[in-house]
């Protein structure tokens, strides 16, 4: 056989073997959703990446949004992020939550009595 034909066969065989191995590489990488919903205001990037449809880029977008805009007020705030469509949001919805903000104690009220000047 001419050398050109042998090279083509070797390339084709190598390509077929490579493509056959691709599903094996991803077989063990299926995500397992968390046991309980993840709080969007306290989750780390690693915790967010465990959610279905969330990779490093989306996790970073969530953290950046939180740093820039403050805590999430409701789960639906995710829809304002670039890259989160309505369908992606619907897949995420069961796995995310926003815990209520802790209530701060009220500061003491100023008395209504007039202030006296100290001498």
Image (cartoon, rainbow, N blue to C red):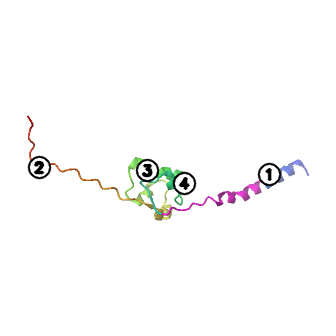
Q: Residues within 10 Å of mark 1 (few under 14, many from 20)?
A: few
Looking at the rendered image, the disc whose residue lies closer to the viewer, 1 or 2, is 2
Q: In front here: 23 or 5?
A: 23
Closer to the chain start, of discs 1 and 4, is 1
Instruction: Rate crowding at label 2 as few (under 14), some (14 to 19) or many (20 or more) other CA atoms within 10 Å.
Output: few
Q: Nearer the viewer, mark 3 or mark 2?
A: 2
Quarter placement of the C terminus? top left
Q: Give the secondary structure at mark 2.
A: loop
Q: Was residue 3 drawn as part of the magenta stretch in this picture?
A: no
Label 4 crowding class (10 Å Cα cut-off): few <14, some 14-19, many 20+?
Answer: some
Residue that carries the numbered disc 1 in the rendered image:
11
Which is nearer the eye, 77 or 37? 37
Task: Report the disc number at residue 112.
Answer: 2
Q: Which residues are magenta?
A: 14-35
Q: What whole-number distance in Å separates the C-alpha atoms at marks 3 and 2?
A: 42 Å
Q: Residue furthest right?
A: 1
Tag of residue 55 = 4
Q: Position of residue 107 (x, y in %)?
A: 22, 50
Secondary element at image label 4? loop
Q: Quadrant of residue 18?
A: bottom right
């Amino acid at each position: 056989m001419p050398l050109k034909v042998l090279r083509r066969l070797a390339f084709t065989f190598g390509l077929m073997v490579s493509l056959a191995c691709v599903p094996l590489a991803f077989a063990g990488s299926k995500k397992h959703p968390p046991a309980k919903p993840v709080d969007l205001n306290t989750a780390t990037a690693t915790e967010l990446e465990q959610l279905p449809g969330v990779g490093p880029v989306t996790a970073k977008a969530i953290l950046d949004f939180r740093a820039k805009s403050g805590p999430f007020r409701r789960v639906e705030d995710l829809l304002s992020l670039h890259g989160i469509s309505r369908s992606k949001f619907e897949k995420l919805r069961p796995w995310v939550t926003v815990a209520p903000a802790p209530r701060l104690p009220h500061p003491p009220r100023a008395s209504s009595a007039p202030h006296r000047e100290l001498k």
